[in-house]
Image (cartoon, rainbow, N blue to C red):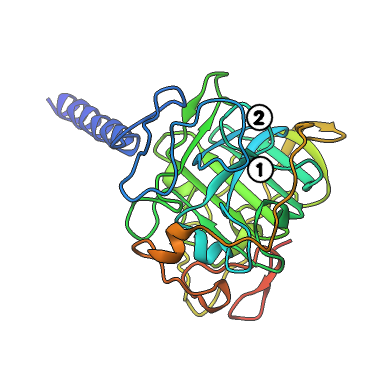
């Protein structure tokens, strides 16, 4: 009888754990690039029904994380000094290395370093470049983009992320985080599962790339397999929150292996870099989206970030 009760308890515990795992993977909607709606969220600036090819005025808000020579980041739709990430986070559009997704393409020569890592739980791209060529003003320290935002609709509103890295077939990655500035970027997309929210945590928006996604930020291009890193902000049984008096150092970059190097990445398309004298989108200028302060990056405290090494409140240097 005692053994039966123990067995029943074990079954109950396993059932609860399984239920929690299912809950962690349940989202209000799941799309593929082929069946994405025109807009996945109310108040969206652009579209998720993007077609194929490329267009340098595209408002596509679908990003892809596939390989070192096939990825995207989010960036401003229009150039100009007011298009800092802190002002445009609600309306960013996808800029991609490759054509074929109906997005804008990143002009060849923009990216001087890109390092793609695939782990069992996420894919990640980190690197450097002259991102003024995708409308980010020179000197902009950037900001953090994710599928949540202040109102749950995402920054950008309705932004979707897909990858074919895990199975060879496209799947939506519901949890992701993307930091971008005028000179550096990092983008992680997590495979759906119980650990995805923690491994793609979005609450550390002032901590920057090096702290959230430790990895290779040098010049050159490679693709590696990697170990799954520790969740950002979690140290054993303790969790760090922004604003605490002592800021812990970043986790060490996880080990990588099976790295392959390529000499360059690009699309060989005759596209030009942004004209930084143009005005930014009237969508933002005339009607700031809900949850956005409208102030410049320099004056923001909620989503400003320095993507390079920064000093924590206790004076310790963070980053690598």
Judge the density around disc 1: few (<14), some (14-19), many (≥20) Cα neighbours within 10 Å: many
Q: Image quarter for residue 106?
A: top right
Residue sitting at x 45%, y 53%: 155
Q: What percent of the width, then of the height, locates residue 291?
A: 36, 64
Q: Is residue 134 above or below residue 11?
A: below
Q: Secondary structure at mark 1?
A: strand
Q: Check residue 36 in the rendering and tell me which mark sits there, or answer none.
A: none
Counting residues from the start of the chain, the first of labels 1 and 2 encountered is 2
Residue sitting at x 33%, y 38%: 24
Q: What percent of the width, then of the height, locates residue 313?
A: 58, 80
Q: Image quarter for residue 229?
A: top right
Query: As drawn, which residue projects farthest toward the top?
Result: 168
In three-dimensional space, the C-alpha distance between marks 1 and 2, rounded to whole angstroms, equals 18 Å
Residue sitting at x 32%, y 57%: 151
Q: Is residue 199 above or below residue 247?
A: above
Q: Quadrant of the N terminus?
A: top left
Q: Check residue 125 in the rendering and tell me which mark sits there, or answer none.
A: 1
Taking 243 as reference, is 261 left or right? Answer: right
Q: What percent of the width, then of the height, locates residue 182?
A: 69, 60
Q: Check residue 99 in the rendering and tell me which mark sits there, or answer none.
A: 2
Q: What percent of the width, then of the height, locates residue 190?
A: 50, 39
């Amino acid at each position: 009888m005692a053994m039966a009760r123990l067995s029943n308890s074990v079954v109950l515990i396993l059932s609860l754990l399984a239920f929690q795992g299912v809950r962690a993977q349940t989202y209000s909607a799941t799309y593929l690039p082929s069946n994405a709606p025109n807009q996945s969220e109310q108040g969206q600036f652009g579209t998720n029904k993007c077609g194929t090819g490329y267009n340098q005025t595209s408002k596509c808000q679908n990003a892809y994380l596939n390989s070192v020579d096939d990825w995207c980041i989010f960036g401003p739709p229009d150039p100009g000094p007011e298009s800092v990430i802190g002002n445009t986070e609600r309306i960013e559009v996808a800029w991609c290395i490759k054509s074929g997704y109906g997005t804008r393409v990143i002009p060849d020569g923009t990216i001087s370093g890109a390092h793609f890592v695939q782990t069992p739980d996420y894919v990640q791209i980190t690197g450097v470049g002259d991102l003024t060529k995708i409308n980010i003003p020179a000197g902009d320290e950037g900001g953090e983009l994710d599928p949540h935002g202040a109102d749950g609709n995402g920054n950008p509103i309705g932004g979707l992320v897909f990858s074919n890295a895990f199975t060879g077939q496209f799947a939506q990655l519901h949890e992701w985080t993307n930091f971008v500035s005028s000179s550096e970027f990092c983008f992680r997309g997590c495979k759906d599962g119980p650990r995805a929210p923690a491994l793609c945590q979005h609450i550390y928006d002032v901590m920057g790339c090096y702290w959230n996604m430790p990895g290779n930020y040098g010049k050159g291009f490679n693709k590696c397999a990697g170990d799954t890193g520790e969740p950002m902000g979690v140290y054993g049984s303790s969790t760090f929150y922004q604003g605490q008096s002592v800021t812990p150092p970043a986790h060490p970059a996880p080990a990588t292996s099976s790295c392959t190097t390529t000499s360059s990445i690009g699309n060989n398309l005759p596209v030009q870099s942004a004209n930084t004298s143009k005005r930014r989108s009237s969508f933002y200028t005339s009607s700031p989206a809900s949850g956005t302060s409208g102030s410049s990056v320099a004056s923001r405290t909620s989503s400003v970030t320095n993507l390079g090494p920064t000093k924590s409140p206790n004076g310790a240097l963070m980053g690598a």
